[in-house]
Image (tube, rainbow, N blue to C red):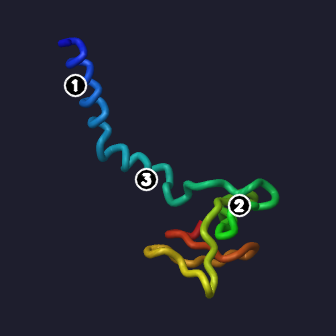
Amino acid sequence: MLRSLCFMVLCTVGLTACGPDAVEADESFGSTQQGLACEVDTGYCRGTTNTCAWLTSNPSEGLCRPKCSPTRTCESGQTCFTQPNGQPYCNTVRL
């Protein structure tokens, strides 16, 4: 019983030790660029409401983002960005 209690306490302390630092670490990996990747070469994204937002740092790769158009606006806090070779997309920053 005491062994089980000690184990539970150590696990709880270990998990809470990450706390806010885990969120900060996530930001260092560029969370604004995380997402489902487009299909290589074709730029295909699953679903009819997504489009491939080609990365400016590597134009042969892209991330699937919601489409924006005159009939479909972006969610709150997102902006509609245009791109040279592709449909406009919604995101918080230009990819």
Residue 58, percent from left and from top = 70, 58
Q: How many residues crowd mark 1 within 10 Å: few (<14), some (14–19), many (20+)? A: few
The amino acid type found where label 2 is placed reads Cys
SS assignment at label 3: helix
Distance in Å between CA atoms under marks 2 and 1: 45 Å
Image-quadrant location for residue 9: top left
Check disc 3 and report the residue beneath it: 27
Q: Nearer the viewer, residue 33 or 87?
A: 87
Cα gap from disc 3 to disc 2, whole angstroms: 25 Å
The reply to whether the C-beta atoms of the residues labelled 2 and 1 are less than 8 Å apart is: no
The correct choice, above or below, for 47 with respect to 80 in the image is above
Say what amino acid the circle numbered 1 marks. Val
Q: Nearer the observer, disc 1 or disc 3? A: 1
Label drawn at residue 9: 1
Estimate the x, y position of residue 87 in percent, counting from the top left: 70, 75
**Callout 2 crowding tier (Cα within 10 Å): few <14, some 14–19, many ≥20:** many
Q: Is residue 79 above or below residue 10?
A: below
Residue in the image at 73% along x and 73% along y: 86
